[in-house]
Amino acid sequence: MFERFGDLPLHVLVIHLAVLVLPVAALVAIAHALLPKWRWLLRWPTLLLGLGAVVVAYVAKESGEAFVAAVPQLQPLVKTHQDRGNLLFWFVLAFAVLAVAAFLLLGGPTALASGKGAKATKSRPLELVTSAAIVVIGILVIYQTIRTGDSGAKAVWDGQLPAK
């Protein structure tokens, strides 16, 4: 199921989506955590991108494993990439949990509540912890996405992988 899409390995297609969706999801969630006045606008995108990031990361991970299973000689060449991808998946899983928590816990002023714009409320400790956790895991997701993509690109572009 995760091996091919037409004539191409599915992993080759999915990684481009992962490289786009994961950092964007993290940046939206970080903005949601740090900008209380914009929470009304970023609440749903944070949730949807957080959950979508898990799906994308899972498909990328599974399609990569299927690709290596189909071409076993790739295993030693992509070991670093595979290890980094596995770690990235766990980061994204934690990120999705925190995105759901942010969706449920992080409130903020909204013009929709009163028609004139509500005043900011004092942050509760749980909101501060959730915001801090979102920022930390969001940065980790971005960083690990870059590291994982870099190791995969080096395996391909340094001429280590066969063309077919």
Image (cartoon, rainbow, N blue to C red):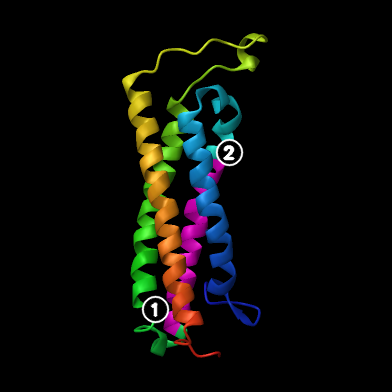
Q: Tell me: 132 left or right of 12.
A: left
Say which residue appears at 45% left-offset and 61% top-offset. Answer: 146
- The amino acid sitting under disc 1 is Val
Magenta residues: mostly which secondary structure? helix
Residue 115 in percent (x, y) is at: 67, 10
Compared with residue 87, is residue 44 higher up or lower down, i.e. above or below?
above
Please give the label number shown on residue 78: 1
Taking the image as drawn, is residue 131 in sight?
yes
Question: Bounds of the magenta span?
Answer: 47-69
Is residue 76 toward the left or the right of residue 12 in the image? Answer: left
Residue 112 forms part of the magenta stretch? no
Q: CA distance from mark 1 to mark 2?
A: 33 Å
> Residue 163, how many percent across, how many down?
55, 89
| Residue in the image at 41% along x and 33% along y | 101
Q: Amino acid at mark 2?
A: Pro
Tell me where residue 36 appears, x and y as whole percent: 50, 23
Sequence-first tag of 1 and 2: 2
Whole-percent x and y of residue 66? 46, 77
Callout 1: SS: loop
**Which residue is at 54% across, 27% downward?**
39
The picture quadrant where one finds residue 82 is bottom left
Mark 2, secondary structure of its residue? helix
Whether 64 is among the magenta residues is yes
* In the image, farthest residue toward the front: 158
The residue that label 2 is drawn on is: 45
Q: Viewer-proximal residue, 113 or 140?
A: 140
Quadrant where the image shows the C terminus: bottom right
Q: How many numbered marks appear?
A: 2
* Mark in the foreground, 1 or 2: 1
